[in-house]
Amino acid sequence: MPSPDDTIAVPALSPRALVERAETGRQAARALLREHPDAVIYVQAPDGQVVAPPPSLGLEDVPVLSAEGRSGMDLCVSEDRMELVNAWIRVRTQTVVEVRARMHSNPEQWMVAHLLDMRKTHGVILTVLWPTDEAPEDAQARAHAPVVSAAPRFCTRRQDEEGNVIDCDEAYVQMFGYSAEELVGKPTFERVHPDDQARVIEGWVAAVASGRVQMFRVRQKRKDGSWLWVDTTLHNYLGDPEQRCMLAECIDVSAEMSAQEALADREELLRNLLEEMPDGLLQLDHRRNVVYHNPRLLEIMRGCAEPEGLDGEPGDGDRERPHAPAAVTLPALLSGLSDEGRRSFDATLARALEAGVRDDVELEVALPFAQQRNVLVKVRPLRRESGAVTGVIASVLDVTESARARRELEKRATFDALTGAHNRASIMEALERELETSRETGVVFVDLDRFKSVNDTLGHAAGDEVLVHVAERLRGAMRSSDELGRLGGDEFLVVLRGVSGFGVAMSAAQRISEALNGRCELSCGSLELAASLGVACVDGAPTTAEELVERADAAMYRSKAQRRGIPVLAA
């Protein structure tokens, strides 16, 4: 039987129309794959890393571009990388984005890439690609990105006062690909990139009017349609009777500009990736001045994406670096931590800066409007090649939900859900720890009398209500240093700390007995409570928690046999 995802019709629609008609991301992906049987896919985690397709996608039969552990942007050629970066940013708000790019696996083939945001349903962003014969409108500019040209790298041309070419050397012809006949008598301005024409005209006018040498850097068009970066030096020889021209000396600087543009692209890629990361990022120098932070850090630490309310006195490093975010200081970022949390972070930071130690620390952050957040801070030292630590980089991850779940699990593993007292394992563990460090310890074993009849006659709901009342009365009769546990059923154990003698333990037991014996008001009526109590104390000889409780249990049975609710001390 076909799955619901396989029943979607595939009319002759555009890829975007197919996606828009699909009800789910899986249906959209299946529709695209049926329309384009030669398609391949790759899958990215929310941080941009390529991962294996999750089984929930149901795309096991589709060819996958294998590049796990790398960024998805690394799959395409460098000239098209920013297209994928911009698509990656847009898909988070537009759900589906279409771009065209060339992959490293076949750099001559243009591919249609559909990015589908499936983070809510499958935790990933899916990209479906298929080959196309239609290149994008800017394909020529992207295919002819500035490259290092072959020799020559220096050439000259001569122009008249109107800017028309008089003649040029052979190097100029080779550099730009035009024949001399195609150049002579025509102005050079029309072969200058539109964005640079104003600079050329300004330099030309200044050279003609002042007679002084002018220099500017512009892009000039080659015959093949590509643009070449050149440094142009303009000399005015119009007044020289032997020359009567403007002499332009051109140096090919495409290698330098290509490197600069590649660096700018990488910086833009890095900036976009850092700002889109789900983690907060913080960089500090060796004096603990803030060098960099992304907006996510402010959202996690202060509940806002802007540095409002985080301004403070900048450190010395901030004054030396005017471009640094001086409005955000480390003390301001940490203002939501408790004193203990700030000490923990300071200690972690000191170990990283002074000893190069990589460490993690979990902290609680108090946000505005009484919100509480748990964060995991991973602090990593930054080193020079010499090994000297120059600062740290810290990633800050919001782990509030996992911390809440962990606390809930710890609570369930530690406390009785009905009464809030320690469960049997937890109270026995607490008693064992106490016996390891103290010989002034006692226990009171409490067992309710006639509790079975309450369950039999009034029901288990009434029985649970009785147990809650008993736990409340026990807490009211205990000292602040004592601990309460429910051993099971209607049996409770009170751990007494600092018992200097049998008399102290018996006084505590008597107080508990008086609190328990008497009327108890329930939602279904009232009844008389009664309990039997056994008391045991450490008598000097080494003992275990189980042994001490067994002695108190035996004493409790002697108390129950007396039927008077009077505590009995273990022999």
Image (cartoon, rainbow, N blue to C red):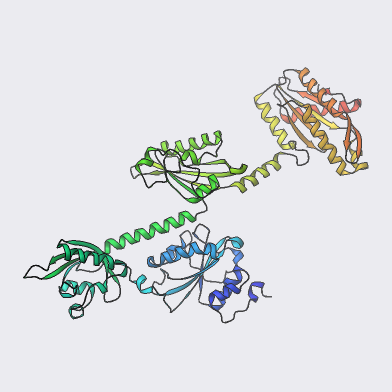
On screen, residue 120 versus residue 505, left or right, reads: left
Callout count: 0
On screen, residue 115 versus residue 229, left or right, reads: right
Camera-side residue of 419 and 555: 419
- Quadrant containing the N terminus is bottom right
Is residue 144 visible in the rendered image? The answer is yes
Q: Position of residue 461 (x, y in %)?
A: 86, 44
Q: Position of residue 481 (x, y in %)?
A: 70, 26
Q: Is residue 533 above or below residue 87?
A: above
Is residue 556 visible in the rendered image? The answer is no
Instruction: Tell me which corner region of the image, top left, top right, bottom left or bottom right, holds residue 354.
Output: top left
Q: Is residue 181 above or below residue 374?
A: below
On screen, residue 280 versus residue 437, left or right, reads: left
Instruction: Tell me which corner region of the image, top left, top right, bottom left or bottom right, holds residue 180.
Output: bottom left
Instruction: Tell me which corner region of the image, top left, top right, bottom left or bottom right, holds residue 120.
Output: bottom right
Camera-side residue of 562 and 355: 355
Point out the residue furthest to the left here: 242
Point out the residue furthest to the right here: 457
Q: Residue at x 56, y 82 (%)?
A: 12
Q: Position of residue 447 (x, y in %)?
A: 84, 32
Q: Position of residue 541 (x, y in %)?
A: 71, 21
- Quadrant containing the C terminus is top right
Q: Residue at x 45, y 65 (%)?
A: 84
Point out the residue furthest to the bottom here: 12
Q: Is residue 298 above or below residue 105?
A: above
Q: Residue at x 61, y 43 (%)?
A: 369
Camera-side residue of 83 and 103: 83
On screen, residue 225 versus residue 266, left or right, reads: left
